Every structure is written in C-alpha cells, then in structure tokens.
C-alpha cells in the first residue's frame, strides 16, 4: 500500500497521537536526574557522553533534512523532508535538554561534552552529508543521511533503551520515542528513494555505489562507538551490580550474563541485518 506522506496525516498520527502519548509518559516520570546518576561519577560520565552522541546525530539529521526540503523533486519528498525536519528538531531539543541537565550536574559545558565524543571519522561523515545537501543532490543527501547515518544508527536505539531503563527511565523513554520516529524515517526514506529511482537504472547504480561506500565509512564509526559504550556500560554494571541485576541488553539476555565481545557482536549483527533489509527496500542492493 502506498505511504501517505501528507502533512495532515503526520499531524494526526505523530504529533497529536504519538507525541502526546509520549509527553504524558515523560511527565509521569519527571525529568529530574536520578539520584544514582548524581551520586556515581562513572555512571554520570557514560550518561553525559551518550547524550552528547545523541545530540550530535540529531543535529546532523535536522540540518540535512531541513536542507533537503529545498531540493525535494516531488510533493511526497517535500512533505517527507518537512516532517522529518520537525521530528529531528524535536529529538535534538529533548536530548539537548537532558544533556544540558547532565552537563550542568558534572560542572561541564555542553560543548565540552559533544567535543569529547565526536571522533574524526564521524565529524568527516557529517561534514560530507552537509556538503552533499548543500551541493544540490536530494537523492545523495537521502542516501547518506536516511539510509546510512540513520539506517545504521537506528537499530542501536533499542539497545540504548534497554541499557538505560534501570538507570534513567526518562532517557529510556526519550530513546524509545525517537526510535519510533527513526524507524519511520528510514522506512519512508527508503520508499522515497526507490520511487524516485524507479525509471533511472543508471542513477540507481550510482546511488547504490554511494550507499555501499558510505556504509563502509560508517561501519568504522559504529565499530568505535559500540565498543566504547558497551565497554563503559560493562564497567558501570560491575560497579553497580544491584542496579543492573535484571537489565537485559537484548530480549532474554541479561547484560551481566553476556560477555563483552558477545554484546558487541550481537549489536553489529542487528545493524547488519536491519541495514540489509533497508537497502533492499530502497532498491539499492
Ligand atoms: Fe532523529
Ligand atoms: Fe531521523
């Protein structure tokens, strides 16, 4: 069935329904930082760095999707970029607000937190997304941002939600809300790309080559961050065994009972599986 990209559908199903429900759940939890984070410096550090990484990703998606409204070649593509821009602006705001709280509690500025987490390969990838969007290619901008940057990042959100649930349920809920939107961005994005390339096999081959090459670059980025964060979680879980006693990293898999290397391998397997499915959906496999 064809996707309904209209702004009125987005307002009804996302803004009025989904976001209102998430807002009530977040209000019930309250945004104060949990005592556990305020009292554990190592936990506070992982929390702050992870939030900073969310802010970096959301800001990049926001700036690219906003730029793509200028280039969208069809009404569906235009509406989709406009919706995504607002979705990303909201994600950026909610994660940034929590990062502000977390940075202030550690006596750090927000910029110091994002600087500390942004590795050079991710900085260059984001720079490339901006250049492509500014350079005028809607398809290439979608390939780099929706299909590669978000397409490879979004399977991680479900892990993030489970890791944070016992420590910061408010953040776990923010991640879950963003995950629902990201799932839509990658699926709808794949559909937009497939439709635009339907009658142009030469252009499709070019987009497929860009996608394959960008995927390799992002694999290096995720390889670093997955190792880094699983390692950090592993050490804080050992420092606070009572908190992580029942925490799962995947359904039915306790963090404390899953060796570090196995957690890393499971996360990479999820990224590969979800990404392959997405690329097939976009017709770029
Ligand atoms: Fe987002
Ligand atoms: Fe997104």
Image: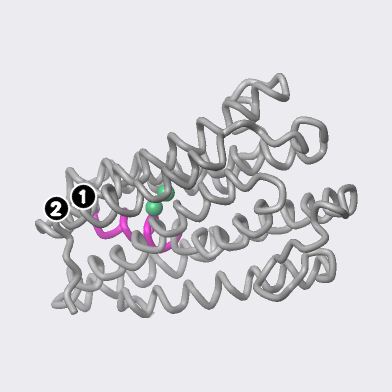
Placement of 120 over or under 275, stated as above or below: above
Q: Is disc 2 placed on a helix, strand or loop?
A: helix
**Magenta stretch encompasses residue 141:** yes
- State the predominant SS element of the stretch in magenta: helix
Determine if residue 249 is in view: yes
Q: Secondary structure at mark 1?
A: helix
For label 1, the residue is: 11
Picture layout, residue 16 above or below residue 59: below
Q: Are marks 1 and 2 in contact (CB under 8 Å)?
A: yes
Residue drawn where x is 38% and y is 40% of the image = 90
Q: Image quarter for residue 70?
A: top left
Location of mark 2 (residue): 8
Left or right of residue 127: residue 221: right
Nearest the viewer among 10 and 199 is: 10
> Bounds of the magenta span?
138-149
Q: Does mark 1's beta carbon lie closer than 8 Å to ligand 2? A: no
Instruction: Decide: is 101 above or below 26.
Output: above
């Amino acid at each position: 069935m064809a996707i309904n990209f209209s702004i009125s559908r987005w307002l009804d199903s996302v803004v009025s329904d989904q976001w209102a429900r998430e807002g009530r759940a977040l209000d019930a939890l309250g945004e104060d930082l949990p005592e556990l984070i305020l009292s554990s410096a190592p936990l506070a550090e992982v929390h702050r760095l992870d939030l900073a990484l969310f802010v970096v990703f959301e800001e990049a998606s926001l700036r690219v999707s906003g730029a793509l409204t200028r280039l969208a070649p069809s009404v569906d593509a235009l509406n989709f970029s406009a919706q995504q821009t607002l979705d990303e602006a909201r994600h950026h705001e909610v994660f940034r607000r929590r990062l502000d709280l977390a940075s202030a509690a550690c006596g750090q500025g927000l910029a110091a937190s994002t600087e500390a987490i942004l590795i050079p390969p991710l900085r260059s990838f984001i720079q490339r997304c901006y250049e492509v969007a500014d350079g005028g290619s809607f398809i290439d901008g979608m390939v780099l941002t929706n299909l590669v940057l978000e397409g490879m990042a979004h399977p991680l959100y479900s892990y993030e939600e489970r890791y944070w649930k016992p420590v910061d349920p408010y953040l776990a809920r923010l991640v879950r809300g963003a995950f629902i939107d990201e799932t839509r961005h990658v699926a709808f994005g794949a559909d937009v790309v497939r439709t635009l390339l339907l009658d142009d096999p030469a252009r499709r081959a070019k987009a497929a080559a860009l996608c394959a090459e960008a995927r390799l670059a992002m694999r290096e980025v995720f390889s670093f961050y997955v190792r880094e964060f699983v390692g950090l979680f592993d050490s804080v879980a050992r420092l606070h065994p009572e908190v992580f006693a029942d925490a799962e990293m995947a359904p039915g898999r306790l963090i404390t009972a899953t060796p570090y290397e196995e957690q890393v391998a499971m996360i990479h397997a999820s990224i590969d599986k979800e990404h392959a499915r997405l690329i097939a959906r976009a017709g770029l496999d």
